[in-house]
Amino acid sequence: MNNEINKRIESISQQLQNNLVGLLREIIAIPSMNGQEGAVIERLKEEMENIGYEEVWVDPMGNLFGRMGSGEKVLAIDGHADTVDIGNPDLWEVDPFGGEIRDGCIYGRGACDQKGGLAAAVYAGKMMQEVGMPDNTSFLVVASVFEENFEGLSWQYIVNEDKIIPDAVLLTEPTNLGIRIGQRGRLELKVQTEGVSCHGSAPERGRNAIYMMAPVIQEIEQLNSRLKEDNFLGKGSITISDIRSTAPSLCAVADSATIHLDRRLTRGETMDSALQEIKSLPSVIKSNANVSIPEYKPVSYTGLKYPANAYYPMWALEKSHPLVQTAVKAFEAQFHETPDVDKWVFSTNGVATMGSFNIPTIGFGPGEEKFAHAANELVPIVHLVKALSFYASFIYHWGK
Ligand SMILES: [Zn+2]
């Protein structure tokens, strides 16, 4: 019986290919940088309404939802609608907003990261109308905002404010059609030393904040080599991404110095453990440096301000987890081969869904991770069709 369903999914995916390609080209043509997703959300909402999603709405932050089915098991299929900037236009051989097709691939900013996955998710609704939803299941396709600068922030809002808590989440970021089950986390930290300024001609009268920072910098470099390794997620890491100082003039002793740290967190590392690690460095204690996590208050395209602290927890599911097993089964039934099951190198909304809220989360999407944020970004059309087939097969296997 399974086999029949998978054959139908395969043939309907082929029939939907032109619509799917058309939608993707249209949404590539609508620029939607982080915080400016309004127009693309509007277009996707219209598509969901045309397809006949049972309920379509936009929340106050600007995240778009389309619901299909009314069973009590709820799957969220998330794709972020924002993209990064195009970068240096001279590096592009195609119009970044042209949605051009060459050699079976669609080109443009967001093609791979991740308007391709989002378009396929929207068409999963159409597909399930044809195939039929499992009775006990419903799914929400979520076109979320803010991911590129504040991954997970949309889902902080969806869970905490919208009070929507799905039973599982499927992320549609690029995976080269493999299954992704985890990633390292990320934390930003700020370390500040305060000195005493005086005239630069007599530095002995003051205390130079930059000199106080110098041993902190060395100890952070040494800390990086001591951080722990995880077989699956890789090593935790730390690096200094920015340094600045203040002084009353360039002829004075510096009265403050600040460094910004990029800390990647592997299994077992948390905000508290990483913060404590820095606070307990001998040089930080000696200089009485202040260690903090930066806070941001981004404004969404709807005008909503929502606070974000720069902590994005790591997450990982075991390969034996039922959700991963379901994904593997859905893949094998659809494509008759064994899927690649691995981690993401980059960061995703999984930092919130699984990292903060412990909702079982996996990823599957068209396109290769290496094209994300790159010039001449592309997604193969065959990937789009296969992603659509996988989403349908997954919904079917997850629900029954
Ligand atoms: Zn992305």
Image (cartoon, rainbow, N blue to C red):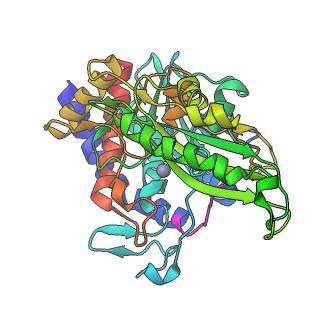
The structure residue drawn at horizontal position 38% and vertical position 49%, both measured from the top left corner, is 174
The structure residue drawn at horizontal position 63% and vertical position 56%, both measured from the top left corner, is 243
Quick one: 295 or 68, which is closer to the camera?
295
Q: How many marks?
A: 0
Main SS of the magenta segment?
A: loop
In which quarter of the view is residue 345 placed? top left
Residue 176 percent location from the top left of the image: 29, 50
Residue 380 percent location from the top left of the image: 31, 61
**Whether residue 204 can be seen here:** yes
The structure residue drawn at horizontal position 49% and vertical position 34%, both measured from the top left corner, is 350
**Whether residue 45 can be seen here:** no
In which quarter of the view is residue 157 placed? top right
Q: Is residue 81 above or below residue 287?
A: below
Quick one: 93 or 97, which is closer to the camera?
93
Q: Is residue 138 above or below residue 150?
A: above
In which quarter of the view is residue 280 placed? top right
Q: Quadrant of the N terminus?
A: top left
Q: Quadrant of the C terminus?
A: top left
Q: Is residue 32 magenta?
A: yes
Give the magenta range: 28-34
Q: Is residue 149 magenta?
A: no
Residue 359 percent location from the top left of the image: 50, 21
Q: Is residue 354 above or below residue 336?
A: above
Q: In the displayed structure, does residue 378 sit left or right of residue 139? A: left
Q: In the displayed structure, does residue 311 sit left or right of residue 369? A: right
State the residue lying farthest toward the left: 337
Residue 348 percent location from the top left of the image: 48, 41
